[in-house]
Amino acid sequence: MSESVPDPRLQSLINKLRPGPLRRMTVAGFDGADVLVLLGESGEEGSEVGRIPQDEVSIRRADHPSEVFTVGQRIEAEQIGRWRGQLNLSARACENPELRAFLVAIQPGQIVSGTVSGVHNFGVFVHLDGEPQGLCTGFIRVPDLTWDWITHPSEATEVGQRITGEVIMSETRSAQVTISLKALLEDPLVRFADQTGHVLNGTVTKIVPFGVFVRLGPGIEGLLHVSEMTGSPVESPAQLVSEGDQITVRVAEVDLQRHRVRLRAHDS
C-alpha cells in the first residue's frame, strides 16, 4: 500500500474537529437561541462565562434551548474554541455518554469494520462494529470508496456488505466516524508511474471544455488537453471525439503527489 502525502488543509480540519476537553458548568441563562453558562464546579458569580451556540445545544430538535435546559442546571459540554474572546462549547457532543465514549476511543488511522446500511449519491453509511445499538456512526465519502472511476457509490459497495476501512476522523459533535476504503488499497498510479513516455490505448470517459479524460486501466485516468488533440484548435473537444471512443495517447507525466496523469496525442 502506498503512502500519500497528507493534505495540510485536510489535516487542519481534522485537528479542529477532534474532540475537545470536557467541561462542567451551570446554565446561567439564554441569549436568544444560545445558552450562557458559568464554567467550573461551583458555577458561582465571577466564574468564566461560556456560550453554547444554538446548533450545539442538542441532537434533539427544539425551538428554544429552554426546552432542553433550565437555569441552574449542572451540565457537561465539550470545549470547541473561542469566538471574540468567549469560550464556545458543545452540549450535543456529550448528550449520549455511551456514544461519546465510543467516538472518543476511535483515532485517525485506526482500522475499523462494519456493515453498509445505506448507499446514496453523496456517500455510504455504515454500522460500525461496537457502536451503540440503534445508531449509525460510519460514513464513507464518494472519493474515499475506491481508486476506480465510478458514477455512483452503488458501483463500489452495496447494502449489507461487510467492509473494513481506515479512520479519517471521528467527530463527537456530528456523531460520525469518517472512514476510507481507498486508504487500504494500493494506489494504482504507483505501478503505472513507469509508463511515462509510453504509447497506450484508452477509452474516452468524459469530455470537458478543456479536454477529455481517458481511462487507461483500472483506477487510472489521464487528461488529454484540447491543445494536445489532433485537429486542434476547435471550439470543443466533442467535435473530435465522443465518450466511449477508443483512442491512442502518449503518457506525458504521472504526478503521484497530485494523483494526476497528463496525456498527449500519440503522434506528438
Image (spheres, helix red, strand yellow):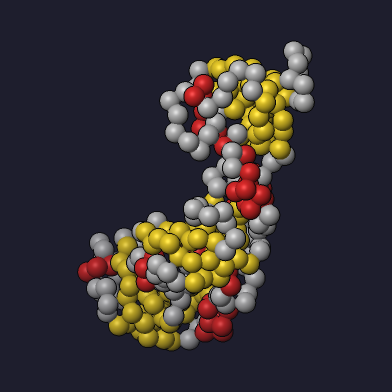
- Residue 178: give x, y in percent of width and height: 55, 56
Q: Quadrant of the N terminus?
A: bottom right
Could one spot residue 238 in this view of the protein? yes
82 and 191: which one is in front? 82
Residue at figure coordinates x 37%, y 86% from the top left: 201
Vertical comparison of 145 with 7: above or below: below
Q: Residue furthest left?
A: 239
Could one spot residue 257 in this view of the protein? no
Residue 109 appears left or right of 134: right
Residue 242 appears left or right of 52: left
Q: Quadrant of the C terminus?
A: bottom left
- Residue 233: give x, y in percent of width and height: 29, 66
Residue at figure coordinates x 36%, y 68% from the top left: 154
Residue at figure coordinates x 37%, y 71% from the top left: 155
Vertical comparison of 59 with 226: above or below: above
- Residue 148: give x, y in percent of width and height: 44, 74
12 and 226: which one is in front? 12
- Residue 111: give x, y in percent of width and height: 63, 67
